[in-house]
Image: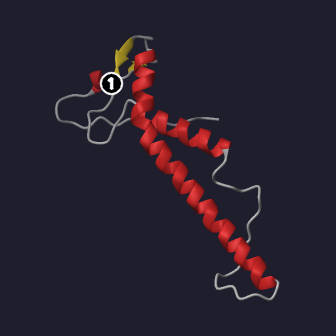
Amino acid sequence: ETVKNAAVCFVLLPRFLMAAVVFWLLDFLCIRKRFFFRVKEQGGDAIDPPVCISDSNRLFSLESLKAVWHGQKLDFLKAAHLGRGAPNTEVVRLEDRQHSRILDFAHGDRPLILNFGSCT
């Protein structure tokens, strides 16, 4: 288990660091625009248009980086991946409470359609 977690971290680290750099760059651009806006207000010559920016909506924060790490980890560990076979998860039949697999309901070349819904 520890080896698996270390391998996942090793694989995800470059993607995570790239996202962190992008967040920092976006924050840097916003700070730059705010600086030029202030210079223009003080009678200076600012080229950039004014942008409303507050200190509370930074992208490069501990909370946002935690969310990015968690999202990338979930995406990496999910069972279904584009271009691969569908996961054959276990389901319970409502009629007789018998356990079976989703693909047990597929017959031949007919497509298997799953309909998810709720009733409130």
**Quadrant of the image occupied by residue 86:** top left
Q: Quadrant of the N terminus?
A: top left
Q: Residue drawn 25% across and 28% down?
A: 106
Q: Which of 41 and 95 is in front in this view?
A: 41
Q: Quadrant of the C terminus?
A: top right
- Left or right placement of residue 48 versus residue 102 in this view: right
- Is residue 97 depicted above or below 62 in this figure? above
Q: What residue do we see at 72% from left, 72% from top?
A: 34
SS type, badge 1: loop
**Colouring rule applied to residues:** secondary structure
Name the residue nearer the viewer: 98 or 9: 9
| Res. 68 image quadrant | top right
Is 111 in front, or is 89? Answer: 89
Q: How many C-alpha atoms fall within 10 Å of the one at disc 1: few (<14), some, or many (≥20)?
A: few
In the rendered image, which residue does mark 1 sit on?
A: 88
Work out whether 18 lies above or below 53: above
Residue in the image at 63% along x and 60% along y: 27
